[in-house]
Amino acid sequence: MPANPTVPAGTELVRPFLPCRDFELSKRFYEALGFEKVMDGEVAIFNAGSGGFILQRHYVKEWAENCMMQVMVDDLDAWWAHIESLNIQSSFGITWTPRPPAMQPWGLRVAYFADPSGVLWHVAERSG
């Protein structure tokens, strides 16, 4: 085995599987956020910019509440305004309070929200 193996040609996209307590509610949540649903069946596949994720009909509380996703954006203030406009806490029964954009010690400006299953999302603004 080589010391620095390369990814085989043709690898285009990495998509994590996200846990889901209520499949229909979670699909509505991600559609409201503006993610593009490209498949809906036993799983739901969403595109998010150059990446994406697979929403599955499987839920383990401890896993969901320790799962984190990051989306890099050009305009964090626009994203935050969109998140606020959705009133996700009352609209989707989310108990975790979204956190507005703030500069983090590691040098990125980030806002946070959780999905209906407890997955924490980091919305980070691209720097320079």
Image: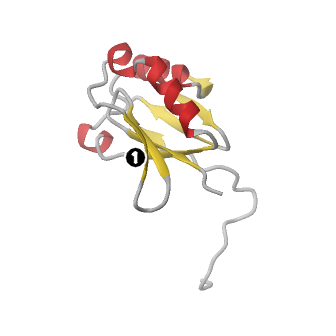
Image quarter where the N terminus lies is: bottom right
Q: Is residue 41 visible?
A: no
Residue at (54%, 39%) from the top-left corner? 53
Left or right of 66 in this view: 30:
right
Nearer to me, 5 or 1? 5
- Residue 119, compared with residue 88, is above or below; it is below
**Secondary structure at numbered mark 1:** strand
Residue 105 position by quadrant: bottom left
- Residue 74, compared with residue 20, is above or below; it is below
Q: What percent of the width, then of the height, locates residue 109?
A: 49, 49
- Residue 89, compared with residue 50, is above or below; it is above
Q: Is residue 73 visible?
A: yes
Q: Spot the residue most to the top.
A: 91
Residue at (75%, 62%) from the top-left corner? 9
Residue at (40%, 28%) from the top-left corner? 57
* Marker count (numbered): 1
**Mark 1 surroundings within 10 Å by alpha-carbon count, few (fewer than 14), some (14 through 19), many (20 or more):** some
Image quarter where the C terminus lies is: bottom right
Q: Amino acid at mark 1?
A: Met
Nearer to me, 62 or 79? 79
Nearer to me, 90 or 37? 90
Give the residue number, with chain letter if any, for mark 1. 68
Left or right of 128 in this view: 125:
left
Q: What percent of the width, then of the height, locates residue 93?
A: 31, 18
Residue at (48%, 60%) from the top-left corner? 107
Q: What percent of the width, then of the height, locates residue 82?
A: 53, 24
